Image (spheres, coloured by chain):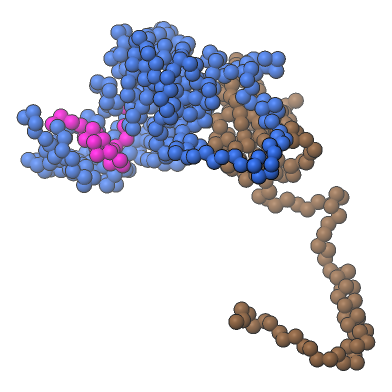
Chain colours: A blue, B brown
Amino acid sequence: MSDQKFKVTIDNITVEVAPGTTILNAARMIGGDVTPPAMCYYSKLEGSGGKCRTCLVEVSKGSEKDPRPMPKLVASCRTTVMDGMEVKNITSPKVLDARKGVVEMLLINHPLDCPVCDQAGECHLQDLSYEHGASGTRYEFDRRTFEKEDIGDYISLHMTRCILCYRCVFTADQLTNKREHGILERGDHAEISTLLGKSLDNEFIGNVIDVCPVGALTDKTFRFKNRVWFTKPVDAHRDCPTCSGKVRLWMRGDEVFRVTARKDQWGEVEEWICNDCRFHKKETKDWVIEGPSKIDRHSVISQGHYVGVKKQPVLIDKVIGKNPKLLLDIHKVSDVNRPEIELSKIEGPAHSDDFKPNK
Amino acid sequence: MKLTNRAAPVNRDPMTFGEKIYIPAIAKGLSITIGHIFKKKATVQYPEEKRPFSPVFRGLHVLNRDEEGRERCTACGLCALACPAEAITMEAAERKPGEEHMYREEKYAAKYEINMLRCIFCGYCEEACPKDAVYLSETVMPTNYTRESFIYKKEDLLIPNPKK
């Protein structure tokens, strides 16, 4: 039984997987467009999945022994494969239609405040709705709102953006000794909250920022500092006593704006990092830089970051026989990026008094 | 090889007496000149009279306010992302309690700059803006003697507050 392999066909591509593998993980072995998107399933978190329904697939043949198709679309993150199973993902119009409906449902109460949200540019819900959703909304009623809750100095919670994927709850359960936040209330009123205004301060709790597929949990030390696509992701490490110390720095020039864990091609954290690395080590000298991170070239984050381009030598001084006269030094005129206002060094978001002219 | 059939051979015959006295040719030329006096003029008397702009004219940028006079821009950076000339830069800040009458959203542009020397007036920033904040107006970019004056700050771009 141990070396037995199940043959499963997903979108006419056959792959052999071990028994007990889910359809989603089998599809991830094939990779590419065949893989169903997942908003709540997280391979590193035990028990995750089955909540968002974006990974629905059609099983057109149950198994070799029982070739009847499954009557309804199934959640691929929770359904294990059978021998001879045939699965349709992007080849099934039923699946694509259902997924469009799921995206519409997820967006019903989403505030669509992407211009303000710090997650924009690396948001899974943005990618999902761009690929599978409708461009307009049919919802005419007031969206669900919550009272804003302060959950500590490092993490900001925007409950309106939450899609209730439970990833952060599982993270806190499995990474920390004592979970301090969870889902309160039921149904439409369900919300992520700490019990009676506690703050999240476990030393690994910062990882909830990385697992959050939307902008509900974001880094307060990076809040409004810059847009994700204007910062450059760089892989770096340091000798950390509590975690692996392997992180991704989001830099602009020499300034470290944000520290996150490294993410793999499915947007999942490779190694968990501690709060000390994430929130307190915001200087280049704290880190050993390995090189620019690999970012999918279709991502907005890779805009303007060219790989393998050789810089052309400047020849104008040789052509005209002297150094060209600089007619305008932009740094003398511009108000932006003043050296005396170092945004990355400010704790939390910048405010109007950080930009006072006397500073 | 002929490209068209409109080429006419040049007449190189010696001039006749009528052509030699030039009077008919002068009269013919004058009739064209005088005829133009009665035609519609192609020019306008510029400073006093101005031509209407085309509806798609793209001039100097303005930063818009909403009907309550609050700044619409939230410093989302999409204009700077769309800008092919990389002329737009900005820095964002969080709105404090008590500043709700100044800024529409919880995040706003503390600094917003357009380098008009780099700007090519393509209008992509206006297209990209999700908040209807930046518009290209019907004002021709004013000229100046110094390059420094072409760096337009947020104060230069914002429309005056209608509530004040």
Quarter of the image containing the N terminus of chain A? top left
**Could you tell me which residue is drawn at 21 percent across and 47 percent down?**
A12
In the image, B62: left or right of A343? right
- Residue A340 x/y as whole percent: 64, 17
Q: Is A217 located above or below residue A63 in the figure?
A: above
* Front residue of A191 and A220: A220
The quadrant holding residue B94 is: top right
Q: Is B155 located above or below residue B87 in the figure?
A: above
Quarter of the image containing the C terminus of chain A? top right
Q: Is A69 located above or below residue A2 in the figure?
A: below
**Could you tell me which residue is drawn at 31 percent across and 8 percent down?**
A178
- Residue A93 x/y as whole percent: 29, 47
In the image, B31: left or right of B92? right
The quadrant holding residue B90 is: top right
| Residue A163 falls within the magenta-colored stretch | no
- Residue A124 x/y as whole percent: 39, 31
* Front residue of A229 and A183: A229
Numbered range of the magenta stretch: A19-40
**Could you tell me which residue is drawn at 39 percent across and 36 percent down?**
A296
The answer to whether one can see residue A125 in this image is no
- Residue B47 x/y as whole percent: 85, 49
In the image, B54: left or right of A156? right
**Could you tell me which residue is drawn at 13 percent across and 31 percent down?**
A19
Q: Is A324 located above or below residue B29 in the figure?
A: above
The answer to whether one can see residue A277 in this image is yes
